Amino acid sequence: MGKLKSSAHESVLWPEPTGTISHICVHPSAIQLGTMGLSHSSRLSDNSCLLYSLLESLRSSDEDKVNHILETIRGSALLSNVANVVDAPADLSDASSDNSKPLGNTDDAIAQQERLAADAHSRITLEKLCDIPVFQVPVKPWTAVTDDDHLVSHLISLYFTWDHPLSQIVDQRVFLRHMREGNKNTEFCTPFLATPAYSLSWLTILFRQISMECRKTANLKPPIFEPPGRDNSNDDIVWIPYPRSNHIGYEKKSALLREIMIQTVGFTELVVNMQDLLFDEAFDMNIGDLCRAVSAVYTRLETWLDNLPPPLKIDKEAVQVPQVLSLQYHHAIIQLFDFLMNHEDFAPMSHPSDVNQARLIRLQSAKQIADYLLLYHEAYGLRHVPGQMLEPANASTLILLAALDDCKDNLKEEFIEVCRFLVAFSKRFSLARDMLANIESTAESKGIKLSPEAGAVFDHRNLESSQWL
């Protein structure tokens, strides 16, 4: 077993981490995905989309909103100004008078700045109006909830872009083909399967909540199926962010579905072994044997990470959804060393260097999660975030919170970033709201004062819109 070299007589149990991304600490301004110039035909298409959206807004029964749009049209010749108010938030009160009022303290000033930015970014853009779903599918005969083919295609595209790569509960190619055929007698697409897929915004919250609750219990079993073979029919499926919004220059990449499934199976087996140790075998071990067992599990996890195919490893130059697998690895590391450090005999009966090294490994994984979330945020925003990111984000936040008093400024920025993710998740999951409340209560109980910037992020829980969403 490898050992870190520290000083001549120090005892260190934990092997040196491999495959880490400690070099990735990127300021939000470091990655810029700007828009490309629109061709003449694109501008015509944009204007047509704007006209359609404008007509839909004028049909609205919201008289205040209609009046606001008409006032903007009368007062400005710029189409961009019209686009900014089409589909704007329902509260159309004159914000300028309130925003011009002086605020009492620095905390309020920061919160006001965040809210102003939120208002500006929440308004729809021409590119958002014109996003075309990646997958075109019919609504009939799969549901009676809606008869809007475009809406269903939009939701299906969201599902297969952000959720399916990391879950793959259906075969993407076969499912889409049979859904398009519209034959309810097929065994590969049914209303039961179709509804959860395209009702991501309506039903999936319940499924996710159940899944997250189940993960709290020690009842995982090894997979009972074989990983897909080399002749898998989904190998050539491509992936592209959807909606693209104003990032119209995204390139298509391989969806890596087969590789993701193979590596997920291997990782699940390791997690099952870790679970057996933490929830069963550990109760019959003395602290020395437990430390050695934890070190062995840690080594196997490190080997798994080191052997990941390059496209699945975190890469600041090519951020992809499949790289969430690496986040799950760091989450497992945090859980492993959380268990050890919370053991009543670990600190009193272990060498100080072992305790410090365990704390460092856990903090390092929390930092890697935050660094990747920052890269993801800059690449894709926070409107569409895979649910598999929630628990790693929460674990990272709690570790960084405990280190705030001792850490450097870059860790404070990373703490704020993972809080942004939890706030974004809180718009969708009540569990995320509970996590945020737990972070606040933990900070209060430990006497940790959150910075004004962090407080401003937490304030976004009560806003209907945000610059991140």
Image: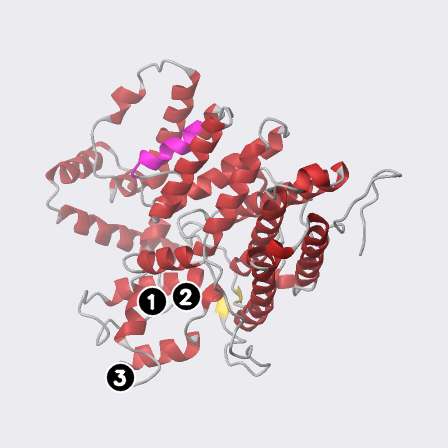
Color scheme of the displayed model:
secondary structure
Camera-nearest residue between 42 and 200:
200
Whether residue 146 appears in magenta in the rendering, the answer is no
Crowding near pointer 1: few (<14 within 10 Å), some, many (20+)? many
Q: Which mark is residue 160?
A: 2
List x then y, in percent, for residue 150.
27, 64
In the structure shown, which secondary structural element does the residue marked by tag 1 occupy?
helix
The residue where tag 1 is placed is 197
Give how far across and how far down residue 282 sits, in percent: 62, 55
**Which residues, given as a range, are shown in magenta?**
455-464
Residue pointed to by mark 3: 183
Task: Tell whether position 458 is magenta.
Answer: yes
State how far apart marks 1 and 3 are (Cα).
Answer: 17 Å
Marks 1/2 in contact by CB < 8 Å: the verdict is yes
First along the sequence among labels 1 and 3: 3
The spot of residue 308 in percent (x, y) is 65, 64
Q: Quadrant of residue 85?
A: top left
**Magenta span: helix, strand or loop, mainly?**
helix
**In the displayed structure, does residue 170 sit left or right of residue 222?**
left
Mark 1 belongs to which amino acid? Answer: Ala
Identify the image quadrant of the N terminus. bottom right
